[in-house]
Every structure is written in C-alpha cells, then in structure tokens.
Amino acid sequence: MCGATNRQDGLTDSEIDITVTLQVRVPPREVKLSDDEGEKVPGATVAVDQGTSHTFTCLAQGTRPAPTIQWFLNNNMPSTGIRAPTSTENNELFDTSGTWLFAPLRNHHRQQVKCEAYTAESVPPYPSAMLTVDVNGPPDVSVISGSPSMTENIETTLTCTADMGYPADWILAWLNGGSPVSGSSTNSSASGSRYSFTSTLTFIPRRQDNGNIITCTAQRGSWTPAPQQTLGPINVQFCSKSVSVSCPSKSASGSIVQLSCHSDSSNPATALVWSKNNVVQENPTQSVIEDGNYGGRKTTLWLTTGALTKADNGAVYKCSASCTNNLSDSCALNVEYPPDFSVPTAMPPGPVEEGNRVTLLCSADANPKPAGFITWERVGSLDSLPSVYNDGTSNLTLSSIRKEQAGSYRCRGNNGVPPVVHSSSVDVIVHYEVRILTKTNTSVGAKIGRDATLICKAKGHPLPRMTWQGPAGAQITNQTDPGRIFQADTVTDGDDVYGFTITSILYISQVTATTDYGSYICNSGNGVGMVDTVNIVLNDKVKPLPPEDVTVDQATVTGSAVMIAWKPGNDGGETQWFFLNYRDVETTRVFDPNTRVRIDDDIFEYMIDGLSPYTLYEIEVFARNQNGDGESVTQIFRTRPNTPENLGITATLNQDTGSISVDGIPQDGDALSCLQLEARLADQNVWFNYGDCLDTNTHLATLDIQSSYCYGNFCSLPVTALLVAGQSSNAGLIAGLVILTIIILISITVNVLAIRNIRRNKKGSQEVAGSRKLDLKSKYKPKEKRAAINEAVEYQDLDVPLQVLAISGSSHPGTSAYASISETATAFSRDKLTIVRELGQGAFGKVLLGKASGIVQLGTATQVAIKTLRDDADLTERGDLLRELDFMKQLPSHAYVVKLLGFCADGDPIYIIMEYMSKGPLKDLLTSSRGKSKQVYSNLHGRSKSLTSRDLIKFAKDVAEGMAFLASQQCIHRDLAARNVLVGENMVCKVSDFGLARDIKSRRMYQRQSEGRLPIRWMALESIVDDVYTTEGDVWSYGILLWEIVTLGARPYPTMSAKTMIAKLQEGYRMPRPDHCQDEIYQMMLTCWKEDPTTRPSFTDISQKLEKALEAPHDYITLSDYQESDYEVTIQGSPDEKI
C-alpha cells in the first residue's frame, strides 16, 4: 500500500492510500477420482452394474481460479450425466469437484473412465485420473434346446444356453409352470471379455405337467431375473389309468342293448375297442370325446348289440384301451330268455291200459330258472297239473289213468320273461273197454214188408268190433240172409289218441213177423275189459223220434209272425204228423193245448202269426204216430217291435221345402223307445239313418248341402250346392224318406241284447252310405272325425244266418247298464283322471289322452290312453265297449298286449284306461313313413323315410308273440289288423282293440251271436262263408297284417270290391307277392291263407321263424324296390262293399 498527504499547517489529515491486489494464478497439479465407495487409485478397475447408474467424482484442489473439469469414456466425452462442477475457497485457493452420473451399458465393459482438470494457464497434458470399468450384467436371452412333446415318466433332456453375461457367477434357473425345478447346474466359460453359460435339465414329465410352460432364466443374487426363454406349452402324452364298462344287470331276449365304455383322462384321447368273446366288434358308434383332467380327453364308446338271443347269455363284452396292453374292463351279459324246450319231451313207451301209470318228462333251458317255472298241462285245458320240478326238468305222473285223461300233454314254461312258451306235445294213448252209447230209445218200429234199420253206436280204444245176434240168439253176418240182411260198420268219430266211435247199422229189408220181430243183441268189444251189449227190440208199435234241426227263421221274424222249420226224425215205422205250439215266456208257464197246431207228415215248416210285438216266445215241436207222442224240441225267440203305421205314427215329407213333420209318437210308451227315420238318395237303393232317433213329435228342416271332389280321402275344399227355384237344395236327398221302426232300447244285462228293427241285409250299406254323405257334408263334421268315418269302410255287414239267442238275465228297462262289469281293484276314481285332449276316433269309439294320478305309483300322474264311446254311440256300441272291458279284465298282462290299467264304469261316460302308446296305431306309423313326393291317394309313395326292413320284421314278430299269448289264453281277436296294433316309444308293437275279441275257453270256435259290421278284408274264408271264428282264423288275419306291414299300410285287395274279393278267394285266389318282398316272407303269408284252417301255422311257429329272420344278415323286405302304382286303392261305393 502506498500513502500520501499535502497538509502544511501541520494538522493531521486523512491519508490517501492506494492498494493493489495481486492475482497469482495457480493451475491444477493433480486430480483425484472417486465414487460412492471412496477414492480410487488411478488405473484401478471398478465394477459397475449394467443399467444401474454409477456416480464418479473428480476433485482438483488448490487452484486459482477454479479449473474446468472434463470427463472422458474411452477418450470420448459423454453427452449426458455431467453435472456442473462446484468449488469451495480455502486460503484464497479453490477446491473444485465435478460429478458424472454414469449409466453403464454392456458395451461399456472394460472401457476407461477419465477426468481431467485445467485452467487457462494449464499446459497439456492436463492433470487427470483414469479408471477401468467392468460392467456386470446378465447374458443374452437364453435358448432352450428340446422338444415340447414328451411322454409321462419318460426322461427327457433340456439344455439352456446364454451368452455375454458377466461376471461368471450367473446361474441359469429352470421353472416348470412357474415353480422352480431342482436338479440342474450352470457351467460358465469365457466368451471374449464376458462369459457364456450352459445348464442341462433331466426332466421326468408327469401328467399334471401337461400344458405347462418350461422357463429358463439367468439369475444372480438380488438381480432382477434376466430375460427368460420358454418352451411349451409342453405336450405330455399320458395314458388313461382306468377303463370302465357299463352293462345292464339283466336284459330281455329280443331287446337291443347299449353298452358303454368310459376311459378317464388321457393325452391324446384313448382309442377304445370293443370285443365280444374276444372277437373285435366292427359296429360301435363314433367315440364321444370330452375334456378331462390335466388337459387330457375322456373317451366314451357305445356299442349297440343286435337283438339279443339266448346264445348271448354269458357273452363277455370287453372294452380295451389302445394306450397300454393291460388296460380293459369287461362284463358278461345276463340275457333273460323264455324257456326253450329244445330237448324233446319224453314219450310214453306206447298205449297204456286204463288204470295203469304213465310218467312224462320234459326239460327246458331258461334264464332265469325260478322254482317251478315248468308246469304240465293237457292241451286244450288251462289248468296246470301237479308235477315234480327239479333244476329245469319237470316230471308228470298219471297214476291210475282214466280214459278221460287220454290226449296231448305238453309243458308250459313261464319264467317271467315273455312269452309263455310250450313244449312239443306228447300223446298219451289210453286203451279202455268198449261202452255202447245207444242204450236209450232201443225200440225200432217197422211194419211187415217195410225195411228196418237197427243202429248200435259204441266207443272204445282200440277200435271196437261190432257183432249182432238175432232174436233166435244166432250171430248175424252178411251171409245170414244175403241181399236182405246186412251189417255196415262205420268209424264216425275219434282217432288213435282218444279212441274211436263206431256206428254199426243192421239193415233188414221186407220185415217178416215170423223171423224178424224180436230182440236183437248188439255186442261190442276190443280186447280190453268186458264186452258190452245192448238189446234193441224190433216190432210194429214204436213212437216217433223227436224232430231234428228245429230253427226259427230270423229273416221272417216280424212284430206279429215268424216261420218255424224242422227236419223229421224216425217215424217209428208208422205215419207221423207234427204238432207245434207257442207261449209268451213272460206271462205263461206252460203251453196252452188250445194254441197247438197239427201239421201233416210231408210239411216241415209253419208260419205262426197273431203274435204280439216285441215279445219273448217259446215254441215246441213234437211228432206223433199211432203209437204215441215223441219227445218235444223247444226254441226261444223275440218278435220285432211294432211298425210306426200300426202305432198311428205319421211322417210327412214336403218335397218342395225338404222338411219333414213327424206326429203320433206315443208319449205314454216306454221311456227308451224312439222313432228312427231312414232316407235314400234319388235313383239309389241304399238307405241310411236320417237324424237321431226321435222320442217326441217334431218338425225337421233339412240342412244345406256341400260337395267336395275327392281322390280317396284327399278332397277339394267344399262348395255349397246351388239352390234351384221351387225346391230345396237337398230335396232329392230325402226323396223316398221312409219310417224305419220304433226302436226299443234295452238296457245292457249280463248278456247284452240291443234289438233294433233294422234290416240286416241293408244295415252295412246304409252305414257306409251315411259315411259318404257325411264326407260330402264336411262343413258340419269335425275334421278329426273324418278318419273315423273312413275307417268305417273297413267294416261291413256279413249276411250269414245267426244262431237263435237264448236270453238270460233281466231284459227290463232300468237294469244297470254296467251289471256285466264286476268291480275289482282296477276300478278307478274319475276324480283322479284328467282329460288332456282327443287322440283320434275309430269306427266305434274314440280315444283320449289323459293323466291318471296314482294309477301306477302313488303320488305320480301317469299319461294314459282312455277309450270311450263317441257322442253318437247307441246302446249296442255301449254294450260292445263293456264286453271289451270285461274281456281285458280277464286277460293277464303281457309284453306285447296293451295293458289295462283301470276303468270307470260307475256311470257315463264309460272309460277304459290303458297304457299310452306314444307312436299310435301301427297303420299310421307305416303310412307316415312313406316318402311324400306328391299328393296322390296311394298306399305307397316311394321308399320308407324312417323304417328299415329289420323294423318291419320286428313289428311282425311283436304282433305274433302277442297273438301267441292270446291263443294260449284261449282267446280269439277277430279284428287283427295294423289299425289295431299300437306302437310305443321304443317301437314295441302291442296288440290292442278287443271290441270283437271272444273267450273260447269252453269251446274251440265261436259263432257270431249278434249283428254288426265286420272287417271282411281281414277275415278268414271260413269266417266269411260259415260264420265260424277260431284262432286259425286269427292266423289268416295275421297274414293280411303281415302284407300290410310289408306294403307300409296298404289296403288289402286294393283294386277289388268286397264281393269280388270273396268270389276270388273261394276260387283259390290269394294276393300276389309284393315285388320288394322276399319269398320267405311271402310263403309265410300263404301258409296263413291256407283254405284248411288245421294246416295253418301257429303264432308260436310264426314268431320263431321271424326271430330267425331278424338274425339273418340280409334284408327280407327291399324298401328301395317299392313301386308306387302297385298299391293304389280304388275305394268302391257302398253297394259294392255290401255282401
């Protein structure tokens, strides 16, 4: 500092000072480099982590001024992370530090980090510090070598490699589905300035590993795992651990069974194979594959058997898995089948004499074999005979056998599996001594010079031998008086089983009193027991025998008269004449001699007149000659109701207006009587009922007329008829209207008698004509009834004389209409019955769908079919329905017969409650299965849409089994047709509709005892011609049904009227073989249509043949060969249908 002053006075004054500051510049002499861990020795190596920022600090001390700090990375100045340096002063010198936030990358590895400090005065090289950085970091993304497809429990080797990691202590870790996998190690090797890593994993896959991801990742301490490589999802193939087969505990013979095989989860899905008794089956259904455990698939394979037979019982069905050799499951079928009497029934050694002992034996195979399932019976009797059963064999012992026990015997097998079957029969032949049968009326009359006939009839086994002795005791032979006396023996009845009836006739010409009158002895013997004899006296004083074949001619019965006819019996050698008498059964007990009428010898019929209308009469006829009166013969009949004319009833037809007035109907008469009007169309002879039966005077106005044009039952829309001035549009409809009769409606009794004065030879055509009229008047007929009207065409009247009805029980009005139905456990409360809807109508009734609560199981409502009467039903049809109910109640249950569940008969309407068959009538099923390429009324329209040949044969077999059961119950159906067979949900056919069925337990055949429409096209020839109905007649009808099945519901004799059909059948005509039907099935039809009923097959035989047909590999009905035009129907008019 320099100071100066300028005062002269000597006073003190401020000095002037001048100070000069010297700035000495001090450049940096050294630099120190440090990081967070402290100062680093120059040239040292520092480890840094890749991706993790690292802070370096550069310090220059004691400089003036503060220096510039410069950073370098491998001699390149970084562009980021440099922070401004900071300085602190210390003794006028500066300490300056600079910071670099270093972001290390893999490529920074082994590079130099340098900092230098300098001022303006510094001279290069500047002071600096330098470090080498090692960058720690994971290797590149690993690579896994190995296949993702593996097999359970089979070792597989996986290799994971990764490069360019640092330092060498990185490991490669394995994960399976996110979980660590042990058992691997990591090897490292130098790869330039860094390292390469390898890890090998020996992996044993499990099924639960299927679908997992295998991961390999580099790990090192707390490092965040490096990028990972994956393999997968892995596909672990594994087999099922179990296979299970499901079989029914039992199956019925004839049924088709589905067997299921189920395998648990596997990968891939297990292929299953079915075998039967070690033979691979080729026809299982396609496998059903579902999701299983561990990403695998579960497999189900179904096998549908054919119709099971007894040969399938015990058959082992095995299901095997393809994955392993030993994985399988099996089951043995338990096929229940009816008894099979394949072992012939033991025959008796030969005929046995009465009083001896016979033992019969039969054996049967069956499943199950309940105790006593074999019983013995005599053919023709339903009663079981006491026998001894032991393990499938039954012995029948007939001790002290009697001639009445001769006959055919057979075993009956019933093990609870339908049908009940019978063994072949064996004949038990009993030899017994002769008995003469003609020991009454042993007097024969003959005048001198006349001829005499002596008759002796005997029965025995073996064949009886007949001899005669004359009045003198000498044996008479054909050489005794040749040409005048001779003996003729004829076997008139019997056979080798039951014995023989022989008739011996001794003819004596020109009787003489001296040698011929007297007592003749007829001797009969056969070597067994004693000879039997009878004395027959020939003289000239004998009463006549009773008249034969006394009949009431039903065609002549009126309200006041009847014709009686007879044949004369033996006249006793004298001229005979006849007496006829009658009495009112309800008012008199004995015949009044005053009404007796004498008829000359050569007249054998008599018309009784003066009778009262609607009255029950008994007549008697007897013969008389000069020796006395013969025995009388009686018959009972009822006269018809009175005519409207005699009752004062008038009916007036106004042809201009078409109206009818009825007057004079008795109002104080029987409450159940009524007046029935009949009408006919102009120029036609067919009469039909006009309106309801009238019980009061009334005025009827005719309705309008509509018309439709039809091909069969396929009709156009109706058009109203035109009205012509001066007359009603349907005046012609009732032109010629007549009064038919007063109908007395009799209540239904034990024997139903509903008498209506309708001419039998017109009724069928009247009803058919009425059906045609109703078809035309479609506006007034509900649509659902059209089928019922058309079905009536299948039933016509049959002009066969009926037997005279003997009336039993009460016939008075007021008797309960339900008296013939005994109340049993099957009576059902109407309160528990709900009507759902109408299913359809038939010719005689209708069927409803209903629900019945508790009828099968308490608390459960069951769908049922309910048969009842149509609204327009009369008392005759009501009686038919009650008869059908009575018939069904007596019928045991059977698998192929519709089951009666209950009934309501305590009032109207009557309900017959049956099991519900969801597929409906077989005829409808057949016709609906046809192709419908065009709307033509034809019975066939191309191949079946839904049925196969096997289905059709199965239908036929079901019906045959049902009918075999009915035959075994001594029942005849009389109306077997496709319309009367019902089909259930499982396509089982059952016989139904027993409206015409009859019980024939007491006799082999049935003769019709009431008038009514009959299914002529299905009836046997003997039923049409002779009015005789038997089981063999049902077999004929079955042949027609089989033809219906083959032709998918075609109408029999499609181009013929009923008259033509009957004439052709009598000439030997039978329907030809359908082209698509094999000859075996057609031959079955022909055997059913044999003219001799005894040569037709039994239903059991038919069923067995069809069973074999079902087992055959080929089709018996070639559905693809149908010809549409072959079966078109020409529906004949009502007159043609009348026979």
Image: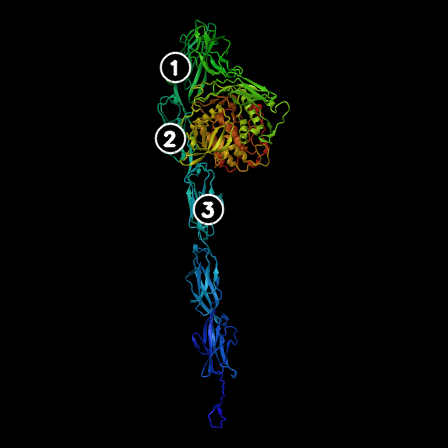
Alpha-carbon span between mark 3 and mark 2: 46 Å
In this view, the residue farthest toward the right is 725
Residue 851: numbered disc: none
User: For this rendering, which residue is in front, 1051 or 830?
Assistant: 830
User: For this rendering, which residue is in front, 201 or 19?
Assistant: 19
- In the rendered image, is residue 928 in sight? yes
User: x%, y% of residue 166?
Assistant: 46, 70
- Please give the residue where the numbered disc 2 appears in the rendered image: 394
- Please give the residue where the numbered disc 1 appears in the rendered image: 532
- Judge the density around disc 2: few (<14), some (14-19), many (≥20) Cα neighbours within 10 Å: many
Which numbered disc, 1 or 2, marks the residue closer to the eye? 2
How many numbered marks, from 0 up?
3
Q: Are marks 3 and 1 in contact (CB under 8 Å)?
A: no
User: x%, y% of residue 980?
Assistant: 50, 30
Alpha-carbon span between mark 1 and mark 2: 39 Å
SS class, disc 3:
strand
- In the rendered image, is residue 1080 in sight? no
Which numbered disc, 3 or 1, marks the residue closer to the eye? 3
Which of the two labelled residues, at mark 1 and mark 2, occupies the earlier sequence position? Answer: 2
- Please give the residue where the numbered disc 3 appears in the rendered image: 300
SS class, disc 2:
strand
User: For this rendering, which residue is in front, 185 or 787?
Assistant: 787
Image height of 432 relative to 938, above or below: above
SS class, disc 1:
strand
- Judge the density around disc 3: few (<14), some (14-19), many (≥20) Cα neighbours within 10 Å: many
Residue 682 as seen in the image, left or right of residue 921: right
Instruction: Indicate the amino acid at tag 2.
Output: Ser
User: x%, y% of residue 168?
Assistant: 44, 69
Image height of 315 relative to 26, above or below: above
Instruction: Indicate the amino acid at tag 3.
Output: Thr
